[in-house]
Structures are given as C-alpha cells and as structure tokens.
Image (spheres, rainbow, N blue to C red):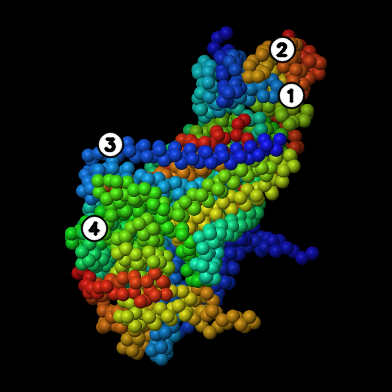
Amino acid sequence: MSESTHVLQATGVVKRFGGLTAVNKVDFSMEKGRIFSIIGPNGAGKTTFFNTISGLYKPEEGRILFEGRAIQGLPPEKITLRHIARTFQNIRLFGGMTVLENILVGAYTRLSQTAIDTVLRTRRFKEEEARAEKRAEELMAYVGLRNVGNELASSLPYGGQRRVEIARALASEPTLLLLDEPTAGMNPAESEDAMHLFRRIRDELGITILLIEHDMKVVMSISERISVMDHGEKIAEGSPREIASNPSVIEAYLGRGATGGIGAGSAAHVDKLAKEDAS
Amino acid sequence: MKPTLRERLGVLLAFCNKGRNPYWLTGGLIILGFVLVYLSPRSIPAFLLFVGGSSLAYFLEMKKPARLAFAVLVAIVLVPILGARNIFYLEVIFQIAVFSALALGLNIVVGFSGLLNFGYMAFYAVGAYLWGFFGSQQPFLLHEIPGTAPPGTPFFLAPDWFYLFIFLGIIVAAIVGLILGLPVLRVRGDYLAVITLAFGEIVRQLLNNLDKPLNLTNGPQGISPIQKPTLTPEVVAFFNQIFEPLVGRPVTANQFYNILFYLIAVAVVIFVIIITFRLDDSRIGRAWTAIREDELAASAMGIPANKLKLGAFAVGASFAGAMGVLFAASRTFISPESFTFLASVNVLTMVILGGIGSIPGVIVGAVVVTILNLQVLQSISLWLAQLRQSDAFIPIINFHWKDLSNQLDPSKYQRLVFGIILVLMMIYRPAGILPAGRRQRELEHVDSVIDDEVDSSIAPGAASSSGAVSKGKEDDHV
Amino acid sequence: MRRSILLFPAILAVAGLVLAGCGAPAPKVIKIATQSPLSGGMSAVGTDIKNGAQLAIEQLSGPLTKLGYKVELAPFDDQGNPDTGVANAKSIVADPAVLAVVGHYNSGVQIPSSEEYHSANLVNISPANTNPKVTERGYEEVNRICGRDDVQGAVGAQFAASKGLKSAYVLHDKTAYGQGIAEYFKRQAEQLGIKVLGFEGTEEKANFDSILSPILSAKPEVIYFGGMFDQAAVLYKQARQKGYLGMYLSDDGFDASDAAKIGGDSLLQGAGTYFSTVSGPASVYPGTAKFVADFKAKFGSEPQPFAAQAFDCAAIALKAIETAAVAAKKLPARADVTKAVRALKDFPGITGPVNFNNKGDLVKAKYFIIQVSSGDPAQWSANKIDQTLEIAPPQ
Amino acid sequence: MRKILASEALREILLPLGRMALFVVGAGALFSAIMFALAFLAQGSGADKLLLETHKMGILEYTLGQLPQVLIDGMTLGFVYAAIALGYTMVYGVLEFINFAHSEIFAIGAFVGVEFLIFMDRLGVLAAAGPLGSYMYLVLALAVAMIASGSVAVLMERTAYRPLRNSPRLVPLISAIGVSFALQDVIRMVESLTTGQFYRVIPTFGNFDERVALFSIPTGGAPIAVNIQVKSIVVIVAAVLMLVALNYIVNATKIGKAIRSVAQDRTTAALMGIGVNGIISFTFLIGGALGGAAGVLYALKFTRIDPFVGFMPGMKAFTAAVLGGIGNLTGALLGGICLGMLESFAGAYLGTFTMGRFGSEYKDIFAFLILIIVIIFKPSGLLGEQVSQKA
C-alpha cells in the first residue's frame, strides 16, 4: 500500500466533548478514486468524524494524513486549500446570495486576486473573475442546474439546493469530496439522480468521494467500501456485501431497532454489488 | 375594480422609464429645482425638489454616461453655485457626504460582514484627533493647563500637511480597527455589539481624561484652533472669475473654504463608494457576505474568516479615519462631545434606514437622516416658534398656538424619532428603504453536459428577499 | 426594489408639504436667533437660554416695533453638537433677517459656529461660554456677558484665601466649562498658599460614594466644584451625609434655586455653601427679581443658570439693533449691529452694567460671592452677598 | 410530604442568602487583599510620601483606614447593580437576547417611584409620617414603580420584540436600542411637560439620611469614623429580599419551572403545553419590576434622577450580568457585587496611588475593560455554563 493509493489515512482519532467520547480511536484509510461510505446509527459519531477530517473539530488524539501529509487540527480553511471539500447534512448554503455567487464563494481558495487587484480592477482581476464565472456556470450545468445562476440560493427547492452545495464544493477543486447525507430528504427518483451524479464526479473528474449516508439503498448501490461506526468506534469495514452480512453490524442496527433494514431488504443490492465487484 | 395605489405608482414609474423620458424628467427636475433654489435660496421645498431631482439620476433607467454627466453637473457645478448663495446647503451636503462615508464604512462592518459595531465613532475620533493633535499647537502644550496656550505658540506642522494626514488618517484608523478587531474576533453577535459599545465609550473617556498626566487631548476643553489647508487668493479669484455672474456676488476666501471642504468630502466619498463597490463585487466581498450568512460554512469553503473580519474592521475604520481628519480641519475645533454613543447610533440608523448592506441604500439613509435632523425637525420647530409668537390659533378647538408648550418642539425629540424609526424599520422593513439586491450577472448559459438530468423541480421558486442582517444558524454544529 | 424607488420621493414630497408653510420671511421682520441645546442631557439649561431670550424679546422689542419692525425669535437646537451647531450657524447666516445670535451653551459648539458668524459679520452675544478661547480669537462679532473661566476660578480662590482657608479639594464635571474654572481655581489657590489636596473630574451625576472616600480622608477645608448645580448639589449633599463639615464653594453654575431643592439644609450645615457669580442677586439688581418672577409666570419653572444672561444678551441685541436702525434710518446691516454692540456704554442689564472691551469680554466684571442662606428653594433669591470683587479680564 | 416541600422551600431561601454572604465576604476579602498587596508594594513610593505629608499617615495605614467605608459603598452599589442585572439576565436566559431598553425600564421605575413620593410629599403626608410610616411609603413607592416598570416591560415585549422573535438575532437588538432611545425622550417629554424640568429629586423624608456609626479606626492622624447610612442598609436589605424572592420564584415554583423549561428549549416547552408567550411576558414582567424597584432604590441612594440616568447603571449592570455569566441568576449577583466593589476600590484608591495622575474618572473605563476582557476570554462568565455564546 503506497501513499499514492491511500489518499486519506486516519489512525487512532479521538474526539471528546466533555465527558462524551464522540469518536474513539478510529483507524481508517481509503484509496484514491473510490467511493467510500461511513454508515452507522444516529449518534454513532459519523458526522463528528467528518467534522474532524474537515477541520471543524480538533481531534484530541490521533493522526489524519491526507495525501501523506498530516492535516489533523488544521483550521477548515487550510484543509480546503489542501483540496478537500465538503457538503453539510442540513444544507448550509448562503441563502442571501445568488446560486452563482455561492459557487464563486466555493472557488475562494482557487482565486489569486488581492485587495489591490480588487480596488484597482486590474486586468488580472477581470480575467480571473471572468474565468471563475465561466467555470461556475460550467459547474452549475454539470450538477444539472439551469437558468438559476441569478436566483437566490434560498429560493431553490430542496433538491436544487443540494446540487448547488455540491457545485459549490466542486468549485474548490477538491481531490477528496466529503458528502454528509447528500440524499437525505430526497425521493427515490432524486436519490437515483444524485447517485448518478456522484459516480460521474468520481469517474469524470477523478474525485475520491467519502460519504455518510443513512439510505441503505444508496449506500449499498454506490459504495465500493463501507465503514460502520457505532458508539464512536469503527466496528466493521469491508465491501457492501461483507458489511451486509457482518453480524456486529446487524446487531448494531437491529439491536437499536434501526430504520432501514440492512439484511433482507437490501439483498437485491448486495447481489448487484457482488456482480459489480466481480466485473 | 379600482387600481391600488401601488399599481398606479407602478404605471407612473413605467411612464417615467419609457423612452427618453428619464433624461427629460431628471434634467428637467434638476434644472427646475436649481432655478427655484437659486431664486429663493432659503426655501426648503425647493431644495428638496433639487435633491429629489438629482436622485432620479440614480433611480431611473438611463445609460451610464448620462448618469455620470448628471452627477458631475450636480456635484461640481450646481451645488457649489447654490452653496455660495446659501452656505447652509453646502453644509448640509457636506455633512451628507461625511456621513455617507461613515455609513459606508460602517456598512462594510455591519452590512457586508454582519458584525454589529456600536463604537464606530471611535475610529472617526481617531482620525479627528490625529489631525487635531498634529495640526494644532497641541504638541507644544503637553505641560500646559488644558485649554490654554502661551501667546505665540507656533503650530506644529504646516497647514498643507492636512492632505497627507487624510491618508495617515486612513492608515492609523485601520490599525486601530485591527487592534479592536483582534480580540473581538472571538466574539459574535450581540456580545460583539456590547464590546464595541464599551470600546467606543473607552475611547471617548480616554480622550476626555488624557489631559493629565500629559496634556495630550486637552480633555473636555477640546483642541482648537486646528489648521485648515491653505487657500491661495488665486484659487478664490479663479473661482470668482468663472462663477461670479452665476452666484451674483464675489465669494470670499472664508466662504470658499466651505466649497473646498465640500469638494474634498465629495472626492473622498466618491473614492469610498468606488472602493466599496469594487470590494463588494470581488472574492473579498463575497467572502464577507458568506461569513455574514453562515460563518461555519464559509470557513469550510476555505475562507479565512478571522482575517476577513479583521479586514472588514480595518476598511470600515479607515473610511471613518479619513473623514475624521476632514472633520477636524473643517471645524477647526474638536472635543470628545462629538464622539458619543448617540453619534454612533446615528450612523447606524442611517445604515439600517437606508438598507443594511446596500450601498445606494446607505447613502439614501445618510441623506434622509441628515436632512431630517438638520432641516426638517429644525424647520418644524422654527415654524412652531413662529406660530407661537403670532396670534394664530386653531379655530374649532380654539387652541392658541402661543399656548403650545415649548416642550413639544420636534427638534427636541431627535432620539425619539430615531428610536421609533429603528423599531418600525426592524418590524416592517428590516432590509431598509433600498434593500441590498444581489448583483445580477449576464450568464452565457453553458450547455448542460447532460441534459436528461435536469428535472423541472429545480426551476426558480418565488424569490424571497431575505433580511440582510446576519442569519445565524441555531444548530451550531453540523 | 420597485416599492423603494417610490418611497424616497414620497418621503421628500411629504417633507416638502410639511414645510411648505415656512416660505420666505415677510419684509421688515428682524430675527434674533438663539442657539442652545434644546434636546438631550443638557436641554434643561439650553431651553432656558432660549426662554430667557424669548422673554427679553417679548418685553423689550417695543422701540423696534415703533420703528415699524417685527422682532421674532428664531430658536435653534445645536444639540450640544458642533456639527449641528455649525449647520445651524450656516442656516442662520443665510437668513438675512437674522441680525444677532444669542447663544451657545457649550464652548465646544460656540467656537466652530462663531467662525461662521465671523465670516458673515453677524454679531454673537454669548450668555454662557466662559472658555477663554471664545474671545481670545479677537473676533469683532463675538461678545460675552458671562465671566471667563480664568477669572472666575481665580475669584473663587481669592475668596477662599480671604477666609483664611488652608486646604482645598478641587472637583469638576469634566466639561469644558467646569474643568476650565477648576483649573484656574487650582492655579490661583496654589499661588495664594492654599494646599490643593486633590484635583479630579467626574462625569458621574448621582453616585459620588467612591470619589468622596479619599476626599473625606484628606479633610480639606473647602471642596471646590467647577460645574453645574445638578451635580454639585448632589455631591455636597452626599458629602454632608457622610459627615463632611467643611466649606463648599462653587461657580455660577450653582446659581439655581434647584440647588437648594437638591441640597436642602445640607448646604447650610458645617461651614456653609458659597458660590461665585457675575449675575447679582435681587438685592443688588432689582431687575433680577422681576425677571425671575416673569420667567416663572411664563414658563412655569425657576430659571436655570444663564437664563438671566440670555435675557441680557437679547436685550443688548435689541438695543444695538435699535441704535443701528435709528442711525441708518432703515433696516441696519449686520456690520452696523456688530459695531453698535461694542459701542454700548453702561447698558443696564439685569445682571449688571455691560461694557464690552475690544475682545468682547466685559470691561470689568463684577463677581459676587454669595452664601446660600436657606435650604428652601423659594428663598433662593434671598441669599446673602458675602463679597463683591471687580475684576478686569486678562488682556 | 408537606414537610419535605417546606424544607425544600426553606432551602431555596437559605441557599441564596448563604451565597450572597459568601460572595460579599469573598469579593471583599479578595479586593482587600489585592489592595493591601499593592499598598505594601507602594510603601516608600512617591504616593506614600505624599500621603505622609498631606494625611500624616503612610499608604498602608491609609488603605486600611479607607477600607471599611469602601467596602460598604462597594457592597451597596453592588446590590443595586445586581438588582438591575437580574432583569438582563432573566430575559437573556429565556430569549437569548440583550434587552437594551432595560436601562430605561430602570429609569421609568425611578421616575414613577420618585413622582409618587413627590406627590405624597405635596399632600404633606410624607413629612407627617413617623418612622414606620416612612418605610410604608417607601414600600408603596417601590410597589408602584414595580407595577409601572413591569407593565412597560411587558408592553415593550409585545410591541417591539415579539414580532421579531424569529428574526435574525441582531434585528431585535437594534429594535431594543430604538426602544431605549424612544423611551428616554418619552420620559423627558412627560416630565418636562409638567414642570419644564426633566430631572427629579427624591423628597427628603423618614430617617433614611441618618448615619449609623459603626466604629472608628484610630490612625496616626485623626481617627477615621466608619458609618453606614440608613438608606444604604435599606438598599441592601431590599435588594437581598428581591433577590431571594426571585430565586424562590424561579427555582421553587411551578411558574419558575415553566420559565426554566422555556429557557432550555422553547419548542419543546410549547409541545409540553407551556404557554410560551405567557411565560415570556411573565419574564419581562418580573425583570421589569425588579428593574423598576432598583430604580427607586437608586433614586433613594443617590437622590437625583434624569431620563438618561439608566444608561451608565444599565451598562454596568449588563457588565455585571456578563461577568457573572449571563442567563445565570446567581452569576448576576456575583457579578454585581464584584463590579460594585471594583468601582468603589478604583474610585477610592486610584487617585491616591497614582498621586492624582489617574483619578476616579477612570473607573468607568475599568468597568468597560472588565466587560471586554470577560467577554473575550470567558464569555460564559464566572459562573456560566459553556453554552452562552451563539452568533
């Protein structure tokens, strides 16, 4: 396992809130170009782990390596500079800004204009703004948004806002994209579209995707590898098929009366995935 | 069904914007207002007509060069002429310019980045005291009794250093803004408001107290005289050569100072407006707005929130610093009384009334509040005073005006008026008279790479204008 | 956006309608403007400056009415704020009917505003601006009938020395007025051999506990307060309640019956309470008693400090306008009025005879040291004169 | 069962009393100790020599001599601040909103109470009242002021804050500042319409101005007498009673429970069948009434009030609330006492220790610096939980 294939490696990550250990000694590594999912019951520490990776939280212990360099404890803006982008579980768009502006904000780290360029409106500034705008429009088109560039982000319907969030994340030119429950609240057709989009992002843009997901259908059909968390600990990792048949995973879910059935209900997916694995 | 008022106004507006109408209307009103003010230099309705006509250049739809031409005509030619005839108007417009710059600066902090600042006048004070100290005899009076100067004390600097000090004012105020900003970064929302209020009070009290052990500020006595930039007789003569026939009499050097300060103030304001517009429409401005909307999401997008907040504080402060220098020179006297909490709230009222985050809105706010304060309230009071001295009475209830209590003069209730404005604006129109709109861009409509994906549900919904004030999300942690 | 476009002109239109009533003045109207803070924390004194002038115009404009002029008061609110003061000054200057300005309470407003009067040759008579700088600029237009800080402070110190006091604690209200007087009191007192045990300013209006502790332990023979009665009387009362029995001494800001209302009998206890003033008590200037009575009848309250001075300012203005009008046989020019003010000889004001020197100060101001002799506000005018000092301002 | 309830209630009364005593003693001891340390260090300095010359005593002796009076003054002021701070803290606890206009509620209370007493004075009953009667009138004045301030606070919430409850957080804050400004002028208008003056002086009555001599300290110079004014005692006792009563209401009654649950989570409380609007109104009523009572006590202690009287005590009380941990009732008490002590110490000693270079005029600056430092470094205050700061 060389570093080039392991884009993200976490070892012994611990995050505590007061007396509560939200993430407990999680080891984790993912290969480049994969779609990787983290699942687990509510309160398992998934989002906390995500926030630790993206710099919103500082881990108390452990190391997180991204492309071979330690990123744990860096502030979020530094992490974005390293080409990691994320979306949020409860969409956090800048509602008072237009869709286009939202995406331009996403491109913040990729613009090099200075305050002086801005005030003097240098040629460099104008060219860069034009480029950024064009790129933003391309991204809008890429995620399937049309004619909404000048709309306020908050005026879009839910599905549209999810797409803007993804476009905004893509604008920062990530190599790793963290998606926090990207299909939450979507109907099956919308989820299907979203999954299609994620695959394209991976296949066409070569971006590694790490996602937290509750919808087992989505998880099982899109992920190439799944990690399961419970009580802040990683309890299992493996291919979808392995996870589906892992007894401790089933216990973690069923023991708590989990929502989506993981065993029987998604057997069809597992079969499908097994075929994909083989191919 | 009768058309509603709004529909009628809409029709009127449509008419105003039809064809060449905007040009005729604007030009006509400006000229009409100008002539009326020229003929009757003290008539306030005429003056308001002139101001209203000038503002049409902004509000109606017309080509950019035409707008600019109108603006230049009004600012450089018409106002100085009217001002030379009635210096009161020049003063009103001078103050509008000063307060516009202050309000624009505060708007960067409050409107763009959503950081409430109640101590904004402190930065104005920094600029004013900077020139007040160096542009007077004060450096030689460090050991004198406050308010006294031995006869023959020289001035510390030559008067024309003033121009350099405008720039120094920018820099020093920006540094003070950074100093305040640094600790304040850890605080948000209403705590920030209270901290800045405390900071403003500290600065005012320091200015008031620093007459000992070393007499730096003269304390409550204030610093005076402060020098104005020099004015050569040639300049005055030149102005008179051109404008004397229009003004109707030669302008003295003292009166010309009013025009000079007006022009400097207008220059500074234009400079400030350009900078503000350009900052707003750049990655910095977008980042400020993003921080205002959702700081956490902004930093997840790679925006260094602290740096940008500091920047907002510094830029906002720098405008106030420049205007402070100008203020000190134009008044030749400064004292801590000018930099109270009330003054800070005054500027905040302009920002909120006009439209928080909206550049034209903030200027409108400065215009409305200044005119309200200097002209409207005062005039009503004067009018009541006139009535009180007459034998007039209201017939039906047989109320003699001279019985009207002095205590009911509207000019006495500036705070009441401002207070009510603030409350009503917050309840009915939190976004202000001219709410901030987002910039609409010409989009090229890149063809979607995959057409089948676009579902109809993504069509734009009803655009709801959102309150421009920072919308803190209650759920702090993702 | 659309609605807002219409809102702004609408506001302007409404404002315009409201103001349509105040057009150009009728001919032959003479206006005397007042400028003082009518709103905010200083409006108590500011309003009475206006009221004093109003009373004078109502009572004394007879000669001008006979000449065919109508005299009006144009009261402006300077809000104690130089910005507003200067804007008003420009508005006043722009109104040709205004021939004199009575005013300003704050020297901080008077100094920048009078630059405007100066450039328009418009006479300004100040009832209350005691800052030396007001007249030190040597403007022909600027006059004052109140004392100067540097004189009044010194008067207080001389009085203290004449009573054989050896130590003093000096306080002031951190305004230009109070601090100025206190500084000069301190300087003069030290020259006269009085030990100044402390010198402090305070903006506090109610709670003097913490300031009083060091004062009481220093045991000064006199506490001098430079400032207004509404602070001084509260301080004095609290000090007595804490057991201080020395003398109180203050300036003409203390000359208000409300001082007795606040201080009550505590002003009489111990070594008593004294204040210096240029405005003589009723026993010396009978006009004062009549003024107080008229004022109360008209405005329903006791005049605040400087109301009587404002009355005199307006009276001087009226007299000067009359002189100039008679001389010119028409509506006089501002410059004529300005000269006429300085030319007045021994004008009988209710606060004493008025003669201006070439700077605009009173040639010789008579200072009275008055002892508070009753804790009853109604008896304020019966206060005794302890000393009378006549002092010319420094040249 | 009943017995347990009674002891529970007793606990809710005794516990805050104990806390108050602890805070007063603790803060007093701390500040005294710091002062002594400074005085010890300053021995032999210029200030020391100056004191020997003017007061005939050294700086250590001087500090000691001043101390009891400074402590008493600080404590009185501290309780006044605490009573005002409670209004801020209660509203903040429930709505997470700084009721900027609370300082005007305070001023309204002061004016209503004083006007009531002036009216009684004019009727002549005040002068005729015996010692007991004068206390009765004071209690009546307090009651009238509390009703007036409480009602205005409720009205204010209804008109200016409730419509904004779901707006971004800065919106109600700005509205509160507007209310504050408007109320200042309304008070001024009402007061000046009747007499032309807008400040009022509390009539002299009863034995409140008398001093109770406690003891005197023999020093090298003349002995320093330590007194406490009757009205200081009245202020402290009244403030303590109010604080205990409030503590009891919030912690031991049903409505108190409702207030606490609304403070915890408004939505859940509503789901539990608690009338949230009613509770919020009640909070404003209580906070306003306390502010009004504090206004009367302030007027009694410091005699003179004007419409702008609320600003500084309001700012200080807010500082006290933040210092103690805003939203926390005990914290407001602690903050008030600390701030009162600090101000008293700074006012009394600063001038002496710096030989007049910096005087008591810096005490407000001190208070504001404390506010800034606390907000920056410990925004949750001395006793607050780690939840308070939200954007």
Q: Mark 3 belongs to which amino acid?
A: Leu
User: Along the line of sight, which residue is nearer the eye, D361 or D244?
Assistant: D244
Q: Mark 4 belongs to which amino acid?
A: Ser
List the residue tagged with mark 4: C167
Task: Report which quarter residue B401 is drawn in.
Answer: bottom right
**Given this view, does label 4 or label 3 mark the residue nearer the observer?**
4
Task: Answer left or right for D176 relative to C362.
Answer: right
Q: Mark 2 belongs to which amino acid?
A: Ser
Q: What is the distance, in whole Å, between disc 1 and disc 2 at their CAs?
A: 19 Å
Q: Mark 1 belongs to which amino acid?
A: Asp
Q: Residues within 10 Å of mark 2 (few under 14, many from 20)?
A: some
User: Along the line of sight, which residue is nearer the eye, C245 or C13?
Assistant: C245
List the residue tagged with mark 1: A215
Instruction: Label 2: state its secondary structure.
Output: helix
- Which sits earlier in the primary sequence, circle 1 or circle 2? 1
Residue drawn at 77 percent across, 21 percent down:
A257
